[in-house]
């Protein structure tokens, strides 16, 4: 795994760290407070913009699949007892309409290494659980910067009174205000799921079992996933929640814009 991790760090981790430091140093030079937190927000916006072509294609595919749904349901009803024929007819229909259902996974697949890299970048800066001081972390960061002007002597984790390096689970030491962060994160994840997941419809007859399965999966995404992210926001540094929340807000806004453009 060593060479794979090294390649991953070289291709994704180190460039993202340098981009984050570029924004951080620029904001510091402008004398803007909360520079590190704002750098995380800007970096998230940049990453989201780079992923936007994949997101747009996913939305287009979702729209086409929704339009194709009645014909797919007809095939399911017609060939409910012959799965081989059903798959053959579905594939034929996809080819006729120029739709590749597998393309819908592309956006999620592309996001995975980027999310892992961002997660590692933020922990690289903010995780002090192993006794590393922010000055020690800065020394480690300086070893991988691309230019001297990106080097830092320490990292200021404060963002409008909130320490981004602190996990809300340590609220007894830093204040109950930190408990609001995982709640906000979970709520935003819920609204993101509400905005981006397809609406489930009640159906009867032969398609009921399939609908029940889709409804169960949608319910898990709408409720269990926000709870899971909220828990992560509780045990991990606040800086990660800032990234999640920024990404959620952008996704919600973009989905609403997409719906209005239909």
Image (cartoon, rainbow, N blue to C red):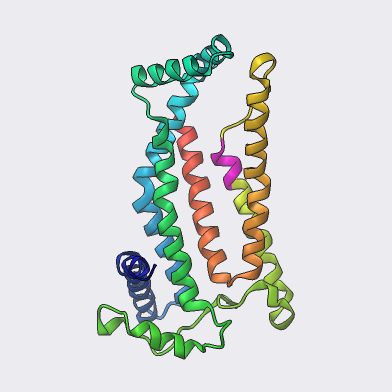
The residue sitting at 43% across, 77% down in the picture is 32
Q: Which residues are magenta?
A: 192-197
> Is residue 133 shown left or right of residue 141?
right
In the image, residue 164 lies at what x, y percent? 55, 75
Q: Is residue 33 visible?
A: no
> In terms of depth relative to the viewer, which is nearer, 221 or 93?
93
The residue sitting at 58% across, 13% down in the picture is 81
- Residue 206 position (above or below residue 115): above
In the image, residue 151 lies at what x, y percent? 33, 85
> Is residue 112 shown left or right of residue 29?
right
In the image, residue 89 lies at what x, y percent? 44, 15
Q: Is residue 246 magenta?
A: no
Q: Classify the position of the C terminus by image quarter.
A: top left
> Is residue 149 shown left or right of residue 198?
left
Q: Classify the position of the N terminus by image quarter.
A: bottom left
In the image, residue 220 lies at what x, y percent? 66, 43
């Amino acid at each position: 795994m060593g060479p794979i991790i090294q390649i991953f760090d070289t291709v994704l981790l180190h460039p993202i760290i340098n981009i984050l430091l570029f924004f951080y140093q620029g904001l510091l030079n402008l004398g803007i407070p909360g520079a590190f937190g704002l750098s995380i927000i800007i970096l998230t916006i940049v990453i989201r913009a780079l992923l936007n072509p994949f997101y747009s294609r996913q939305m287009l595919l979702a729209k086409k699949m929704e339009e194709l749904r009645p014909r797919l349901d007809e095939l399911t009803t017609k060939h409910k007892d012959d799965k081989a024929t059903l798959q053959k007819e579905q594939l034929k229909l996809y080819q006729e309409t120029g739709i590749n259902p597998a393309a819908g996974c592309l956006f999620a697949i592309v996001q995975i290494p980027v999310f892992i890299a961002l997660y590692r970048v933020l922990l690289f800066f903010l995780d002090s659980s192993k006794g590393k001081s922010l000055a020690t972390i800065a020394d480690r960061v300086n070893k991988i910067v691309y230019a001297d002007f990106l080097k830092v002597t320490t990292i200021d984790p404060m963002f409008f009174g909130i320490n981004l390096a602190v996990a809300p689970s340590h609220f007894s030491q830093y204040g109950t205000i930190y408990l609001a962060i995982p709640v906000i994160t979970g709520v935003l994840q819920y609204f993101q799921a509400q905005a981006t997941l397809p609406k489930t419809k009640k159906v009867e007859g032969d398609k009921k079992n399939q609908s029940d399965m889709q409804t169960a999966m949608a319910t898990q995404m709408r409720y269990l996933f926000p709870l899971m992210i909220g828990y992560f926001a509780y045990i991990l540094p606040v800086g990660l929640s800032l990234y999640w929340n920024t990404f959620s807000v952008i996704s919600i806004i973009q989905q609403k814009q997409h719906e209005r453009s239909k």
